Image (tube, grey):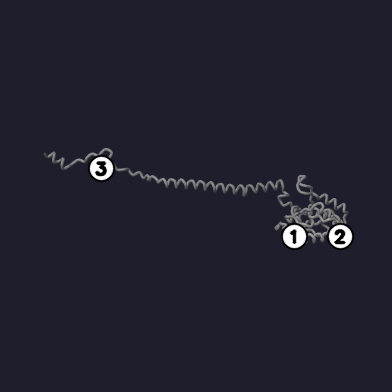
Amino acid sequence: MSDHTDNDQNPQPAPPEAGGPAPAGNRPAQASTGARPPMAAEEVEHRSRMRRYASMARRAVVLLVSLTVLVGVIYPLFITGIGAAFFHNESTGSLVVQNGAVVGSQLIGQSFSDPRYFWSRPSATATYAYNADASGGSNLGPTNPALLKAIAQRVAALKAADPGSTGPVPIDLVTSSGSGLDPDISPAAAEYQVARVARARGLSVGAVRTLVQKYTSGRQLGFLGEPRVNVLELNLALDALQK
C-alpha cells in the first residue's frame, strides 16, 4: 500500500512524443560559437553590386590615366621628335633667316609698297595687313560695291607706280586671298611688275625676269595647285643681287 502511495506522490515525467519537442528541462544547452546570423538576400545583392561598382571605377581611373599619358604626353613628344628630326624647317615655322636674323616666314606674306620690290597680293586681315593672329578674308561678294571700289583703287595704285604698263592687271594683285596671309603671287603677277622693279633698281629687265623664273615653283607633285612665286624670297634675292 505504501509503494502505491509513493508513486502517486512522485509521478515520473511522461516520455516525449515521437517527433515532438523535448521538455525544457531536458534540452541540451547550445554552445556559443560567435557566428553571425545569415544575411538577408537583399544585403548580399547590395554588397555584390557595390563590389562591381568599385571594380568598374578602378578600371575607369586606370584607363583615364593611361590615355592621358599616352595621347597627352607620349604621342605629342613622339610627333614633335619626328618633326624636329625629319622636317626641321617646317616644324619650326618655315622661317626665313638672313644674316642670322629671322626676317619672315615662307608661309606668311608681307606687305611691300616700295617700287623697288615686288608687291604681294592685298590682305584683308584685321588691324593690319598680313596679321597672322587674325587670318581671314574680306567676306565681300563679287558684286559688293565696297569690293569693286577697293579693286579700282588697287588698279589705280599699280598703274600709278608703273605708268608705262598697258597690259591687264592680274586678278591676284587686286584681290585678297581667303586667309589674307598668302605669301605667293602668280607668275603673271610677277611678270606684270618686272619692268617697274628693273627700272627702280637700275637692272635689266632680263636679269629681273631670270630671277623671277628662279623663284617660281611649279605645281605640287606635278598636278596640285598652280605655279607660284614667293614674294619675300624673291625680294630678298633682289637685295642680295645688288650687294
- Seen from this angle, which residue lies furthest front? 143
Give the alpha-carbon distance from disc 2 to disc 3, as whole Å.
133 Å
Judge depth for marks 1 and 2 and give the one in front: 1
Q: How many marks?
A: 3
Q: Is residue 187 left or right of residue 31?
A: right
Give the alpha-carbon distance from disc 1 to disc 3, as whole Å.
112 Å
Question: Above or below — where is 15 with respect to 57?
Answer: above
Q: Which mark is residue 144?
A: 1
Q: Can see residue 213? A: yes
Comparing 162 with 99, the one in front is 162
Residue 150 in picture, x, y percent from top left: 77, 61
Q: Which mark is residue 163?
A: 2
Q: Is residue 43 left or right of residue 144?
A: left
Judge depth for marks 1 and 3 and give the one in front: 1
Q: Residues within 10 Å of mark 1 (few under 14, many from 20)?
A: few
Residue 215 in picture, x, y percent from top left: 81, 50
Element marked by disc 1: loop
Element marked by disc 3: loop
Placement of the N terminus among the 4 image quadrants = top left
Q: Is residue 126 left or right of residue 70?
A: right
Decide which of tag 1 and tag 2 comes sooner along the chain: 1
Q: Amino acid at mark 3?
A: Pro
Q: Can see residue 102? A: no
Q: Amino acid at mark 2?
A: Pro
Q: Residue at x 78, y 49 (%)?
A: 226
Q: Which mark is residue 23?
A: 3
Question: Above or below — where is 125 with respect to 32?
Answer: below
Q: Residues within 10 Å of mark 2 (few under 14, many from 20)?
A: few
